[in-house]
Amino acid sequence: GLPHVIVRFYTVGSVRAARAFERPSSAEFLIDPWDPEHYDRLVDALPRRPLAVVHRWTESTDGEASSPRHRGFDSLVLAARQLGRRGQPVDWLVVTRSAHEVVGSERVEPLGALVAGPCRVIPYEYEGHRCRSVDLAADDDLDLEVAILLRELVSRDAHPVVAYRSGHRWCPGHAPLVTPGPEAARTAVPDGARCLVTGGTSGVGLALAEALSRVPGARVALLARTPLPARD
């Protein structure tokens, strides 16, 4: 199957979580996800500096080899630190499963949120590093996952966060929020209302009391420990 972490340096290597540092073959490594020295030894042992890293430890089930926090947050931070010190650009692809609510029917896995912070910070900490989060559906099979990751590896899309659901690619966006104007806001308070404003002799309370005083027939009482300001 696809290794938990794929390092692309013209050939493909894999890094898996374990208790001790081992190198079973020239392109396969075992490391303790919580040991900074293992990442240093790993980077030094690579035959070439990696051009891209696919990090899948957040969705991994390595049993007792490490905790979810070590596989997710710690491993990503420590690996980025070691590669960042070498000064070579790296394209990071951090894979999660159901970390985001996209279509409303998925069961969100909160452990995916562990890598959100490092994904955003790594490009600012290390020059030339690009870090993208790819969230897969919980029921995506291996063949579909491989196809998605290969597509994302060669993509130059600038979106830092993408999610795949039922073969569709989703990216977060922003839209302006239209808020009601002053006239619409005042309709929430009926005419002739009786209003008590605590802390109403200064700051926000005073501004609120002033707005309420413009409601037709409203009576406004102020309750505060400080006196009213001087009349202008």
Image (tube, rainbow, N blue to C red):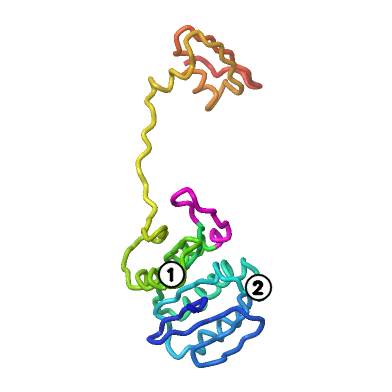
The range drawn in magenta is 100-114
Callout 1 environment at 10 Å: few (<14), some (14 to 19), or many (20+)?
A: some
- Whether tag 2 and tag 1 are in contact, CB under 8 A, the answer is no
Q: Looking at the picture, how far across and down is residue 20, in whole percent? A: 65, 84
Give the residue type that dot 1 points to.
Answer: Glu
The CA span between labels 2 and 1 is: 22 Å
The residue where tag 2 is placed is 63
Q: Which numbered circle lies on residue 130?
A: none
> Measured from the top left, where is residue 33 in percent x and y?
60, 76
- Looking at the image, how many numbered discs can be counted on the residues? 2
Please tell me whether the stretch drawn in magenta is mainly helix, strand or loop: loop
Residue for point 37% across, 50% down: 173
Q: Secondary structure at mark 1?
A: helix
Decide whether residue 154 is among the magenta residues. no
Residue beneath the point at 47% across and 76% down: 84
Q: Camera-side residue: 114 or 40?
A: 114
Estimate the x, y position of residue 140 in percent, counting from the top left. 46, 65
Please name the residue shown 53% across and 9% down the image.
219
Question: Which mark is first along the chain, 1 or 2?
Answer: 2
**Residue nearest the viewer, comparing 226 with 144:** 144
Furthest toward the left, the residue is: 156
Q: Which residue, given by chain and number where applicable, does mark 1 sit on?
A: 145
Relative to residue 38, is residue 138 depicted above or below?
A: above
The quadrant holding residue 31 is bottom right
Secondary structure type for disc 2: helix
